Image: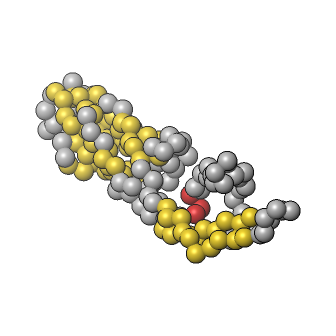
Amino acid sequence: GAQVGTAVTDTSGKATLAYKIEEALGVGAVALSAEFAGDSQYIAIKTSGKTLTTLQSPTKLAVLNAKGKQGATVTLTATLTRTTDKATLAGRKVRFQIDGVDVGSATTDSSGVVKLSYTIPTTLTVGAHTLTAIFEGDTLYAAFTSSGYTLTVQ
């Protein structure tokens, strides 16, 4: 029911409007209509009964590689973004894993950054270990699992 913009028809009579879907719209089908107010040559017309279906936005996690010695505390860091416009996503929970084992989770800050303090156990061998960050998704944003990152134990 809210007007979101206006457009002028092209030579074939088609009007096109670029519209950025705001987060507040949510996910799912919403009613869509178009209206022409009429002029001296054409009568007014309104179309309705159409829908705009919004989907979860795709996401991406950029993770910083980490390194430290056994027994030292390192900060595992990742940034969560919406891939459609690279906007950062605040208030989302991200889990971290080392070699496929959960080591904790934290929530992204207002800049989309999540930081987790992790004490490298003395049982973790010296060398490279797989560091993974996981966003499980929510009603607005699709899940994403990072890959290709490492925790190097020195």
Give the residue drawn at x 60%, y 68%. 32
Tell me if I can see residue 154 in this picture: yes
- Identify whether 103 is placed above or below 1: above
Give the residue drawn at x 58%, y 63%. 25
**Quadrant including the C terminus:** top left
| x then y, percent, for residue 53 | 49, 64
| x then y, percent, for residue 99 | 18, 42
The quadrant where residue 92 appears: bottom left
Q: Nearer the viewer, residue 13 or 106?
A: 13
- Identify whether 132 is placed above or below 143: above
Q: Nearer the viewer, residue 45 or 87?
A: 45
Taking the image as shown, residue 7 lies to the left or right of residue 37, namely left
**Quadrant including the N terminus:** bottom right
The quadrant where residue 70 appears: top left
- Identify whether 43 is placed above or below 147: below
| x then y, percent, for residue 27 | 49, 65
